[in-house]
């Protein structure tokens, strides 16, 4: 990459951010690692789901993905070239503890040992996510997240990870987006394990949160260095399609199910009353046992927020009670998700107002665009101007949230490189770095160089 030369656009984007702001990129194990059956790893629910005909676009799966398992040093070098402070990655549970029970798998852990050492050698701080959706298949066969025992299995695995890596890793995230694990996996059925049962979804959500609380305790007990522990939510930013009472009510339901179902128990130690009233007619109240809410609401060191788009809603007769109204007036990404940077400011100021007290980190934000068909110049470089504008606008929106009092301390771009985008397969490219899946060649896009310059601009003030 060429030398950094921050221009006015980069400087404007980072204007509202402090010099000690943490700059990072994020990935997740199943989306990049490949090596699905190597060194003792056993299948996760995503291996099973992606090999189920019709489940994932193009029949894609993560067997090889970005082959990061074998190319890790090259990928860490990319992070270093971008001048990033931090790298958020997830551990593959079935690599660390095959089958989700019993002893650790030394060969699987050795990979994360090498990764952590490689990062530290390059002065990049590791941020470890313990669960980014790859539940060991054996635990799904035993009932999955709707089964209470899965929470205890998760805590055991968290302890194994903290004992092995907690002498070098200090930043821990228990769960990534439990909304997606629970709602998309157990109700809408579009994510692994592909189940469609409304009461199972709230059982799954409760046990994910219980697992979070138990894991916080385990990490604190097992890590050699004092850990900083948080959880990452993607709170739905629900807005009514109109001012009609029906649409306003649909937005309340979407907010309850998509945001407060997670925020309230973790940060306030209770489930919202209106949510419980919504769930009762469906026999879908969370299966709370004595002491659960105390466990779930362990003190945390930070809150991770992922933001991509808002959800404009109106009522539906389905149990969850709302449906999304596609927004077509503004540009959208390739997902297609409406581009709505104001939502970043709205979400962060709302969290600050209603759930005050924790430092906030944007643990994911980014955009998929059709880079390979529309942004390649004559020299073969990917000129992804649209992604640059997206990043600049969202960083500026974080700056505005900070001005309004939100204690946002860092930003992790999703994603370091193109990868397996779950049910969309490899067709959707979120990377700062382009991946040619035939050759596994990595090529930084213009947005990667732009982010590198923005980071330099942010530090050079
Ligand atoms: O790729 C995902 C990631 O795994 C979780 N958050 C949203 C991203 C884009 O869909």
Image (cartoon, rainbow, N blue to C red):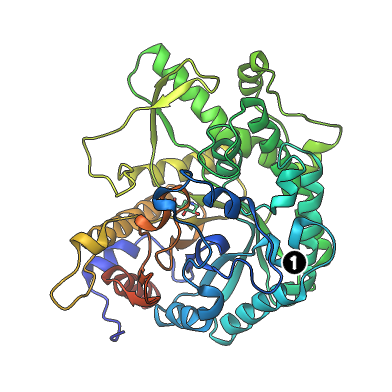
Res 308 seen here: yes
Q: Quadrant of residue 134?
A: bottom right
Secondary structure under tag 1 reads helix
Q: Residue 32, image x and y in percent?
A: 50, 66
Residue 451 versus residue 368: which sits nearer the camera? 368
Q: Residue at x 76, y 67 (%)?
A: 162
Q: Quadrant of the N terminus?
A: bottom left
Horizontal arrangement in the rendering, residue 36 relative to residue 60 (left or right) = right
Q: Is residue 61 left or right of residue 197?
A: left
Residue 268 visible in the picture: no
In this rendering, is residue 217 above or below 125? above
Dot 1 crowding, Cα within 10 Å, few <14, some 14–19, many 20+: many
Where does the image place residue 459, in percent across and percent down from the top left? Answer: 40, 76
Quarter of the image for residue 147 reads: top right
Q: In this orientation, which residue lies closer to the viewer: 422 or 151? A: 422
The spot of residue 210 in percent (x, y) is: 75, 43
Q: Is residue 245 above or below residue 322?
A: above
Q: Residue at x 47, y 56 (%)?
A: 364
Residue placed at 41% from the left, 12% from the top?
245
Which residue, as the protein is rendered here, is positioned at the far front?
53
Instruction: Name the one closer to the observer, 68 or 37.
Output: 37
Residue holding disc 1: 161
Residue 257 image point, x, y percent: 56, 30
Q: Quadrant of the C terminus?
A: bottom left
The residue located at (44%, 18%) in the rendering is 316
């Amino acid at each position: 990459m060429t030398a950094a030369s921050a221009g006015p656009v980069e400087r404007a984007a980072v204007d509202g951010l402090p010099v000690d702001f943490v700059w990072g990129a994020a990935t997740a194990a199943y989306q990049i690692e490949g090596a699905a059956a190597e060194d003792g790893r056993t299948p996760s629910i995503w291996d099973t789901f992606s090999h189920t005909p019709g489940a994932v676009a193009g029949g894609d799966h993560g067997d090889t993905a970005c082959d990061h398992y074998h190319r890790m040093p090259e990928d860490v070098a990319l992070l270093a070239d971008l001048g990033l402070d931090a790298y958020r990655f997830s551990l593959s549970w079935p690599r660390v503890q095959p089958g989700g029970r019993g002893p650790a798998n030394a060969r699987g852990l050795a990979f994360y040992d090498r990764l952590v050492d490689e990062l530290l050698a390059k002065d990049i701080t590791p941020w470890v996510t313990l669960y980014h959706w790859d539940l060991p298949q054996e635990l799904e066969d035993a009932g999955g997240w709707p089964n209470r025992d899965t929470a205890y299995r998760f805590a055991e695995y968290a302890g194994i990870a903290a004992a092995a890596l907690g002498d070098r890793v200090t930043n821990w995230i228990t769960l990534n987006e439990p909304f997606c694990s629970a709602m998309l996996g157990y109700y809408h059925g579009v994510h692994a394990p592909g189940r469609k049962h409304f009461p199972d979804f709230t059982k799954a959500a409760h046990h994910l949160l219980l697992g979070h609380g138990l894991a916080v305790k385990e990490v604190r007990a097992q890590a050699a260095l004092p850990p900083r522990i948080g959880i990452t939510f993607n709170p739905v930013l629900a807005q009514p399609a109109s001012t009609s009472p029906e649409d306003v009510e649909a937005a309340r339901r979407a907010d309850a199910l998509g945001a407060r179902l997670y925020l309230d128990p973790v940060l306030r130690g209770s489930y919202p009353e209106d949510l419980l009233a919504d769930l009762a007619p469906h026999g879908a109240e969370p299966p709370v046992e004595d002491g659960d809410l105390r466990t779930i609401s362990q003190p945390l060191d930070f809150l991770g927020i992922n933001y991509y788009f808002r959800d404009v809603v109106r009522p539906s007769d389905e149990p969850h009670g709302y449906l999304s109204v596609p927004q077509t007036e503004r540009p959208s990404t390739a997902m297609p998700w409406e581009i709505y940077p104001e939502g970043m400011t709205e979400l962060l100021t709302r969290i600050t107002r209603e759930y005050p007290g924790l430092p906030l980190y944007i643990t994911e934000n980014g955009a998929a665009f059709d880079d390979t068909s529309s942004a390649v110049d004559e020299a073969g470089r990917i000129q992804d101007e649209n992604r640059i504008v997206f990043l600049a606008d969202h960083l500026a929106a974080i700056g505005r949230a900070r001005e309004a009092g939100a204690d946002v301390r860092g930003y992790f771009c999703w994603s370091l490189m193109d990868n397996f985008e779950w049910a969309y397969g490899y067709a959707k490219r979120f990377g700062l770095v382009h991946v040619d899946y035939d050759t596994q060649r990595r090529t930084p896009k213009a947005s990667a160089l732009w982010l590198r310059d923005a980071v330099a601009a942010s530090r050079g003030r």
